[in-house]
Image (cartoon, rainbow, N blue to C red):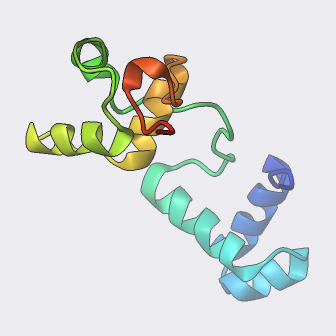
Amino acid sequence: MGRSYSLDLRERVIARIEAGETRRGSAAYFGVSAPSAIRWMQRKRDTGEIAARPRGGTRPLSLAPHRDWLLARIVEKPDLTLRAILAELIERGIPASYGAVQRFFKAERISFKKKPARKRARPA
């Protein structure tokens, strides 16, 4: 992924647009894409800012508020699968997805491997 355009370039593109040039014309003059110039103007109109937004970082887990219940549920019934946990969350009215459940347990360092305690299928 590339870097964000400089603030100086953004200011020059917007100044040219505000002086009467079209967004596409101004973008072509400075060698940036037309959608970039259009988004910069929309952002200036909506928020008054033209600086690039912060990139990267992590988002908080969507199931963090339900951490105690999820961990207690795994202790209570250790053979639950991720899909079963997802079904229980949806039953309780908690919006969740398979990926969200998977990310939550990965962050908690809980794996769902085949173990004797889980009584998976064994050879006869």
Quick one: 9 or 99, which is closer to the camera?
99
The residue depicted at 48 percent of the width and 30 percent of the height is: 112
Q: Position of residue 49 (x, y in %)?
A: 57, 47
Quick one: 12 or 78, which is closer to the camera?
78
Is residue 97 shown above or below 65? below
Is residue 71 shown above or below 20? above
Q: Position of residue 61 (x, y in %)?
A: 43, 29
Quadrant of res 31? bottom right
Q: Position of residue 115 (x, y in %)?
A: 50, 23
State the count of labels. Answer: 0
**Residue 43 appears in view:** yes
The residue depicted at 49 percent of the width and 20 percent of the height is: 110
Where's the N terminus, which quadrant? bottom right
- From the viewer's perspective, is 38 left or right of 88? right
Q: Position of residue 78 (x, y in %)?
A: 32, 20
Residue ranking furthest to the front: 124
Quadrant of res 118? top left
- From the viewer's perspective, is 35 left or right of 89? right
Quick one: 82 or 22, which is closer to the camera?
82
**Residue 21 appears in view:** no
Is residue 72 shown above or below 9? above
The residue depicted at 46 percent of the width and 39 percent of the height is: 124
Quadrant of res 38? bottom right
Is residue 43 shown above or below 13? above
Residue ranking furthest to the left: 92
The residue depicted at 75 percent of the width and 56 percent of the height is: 11
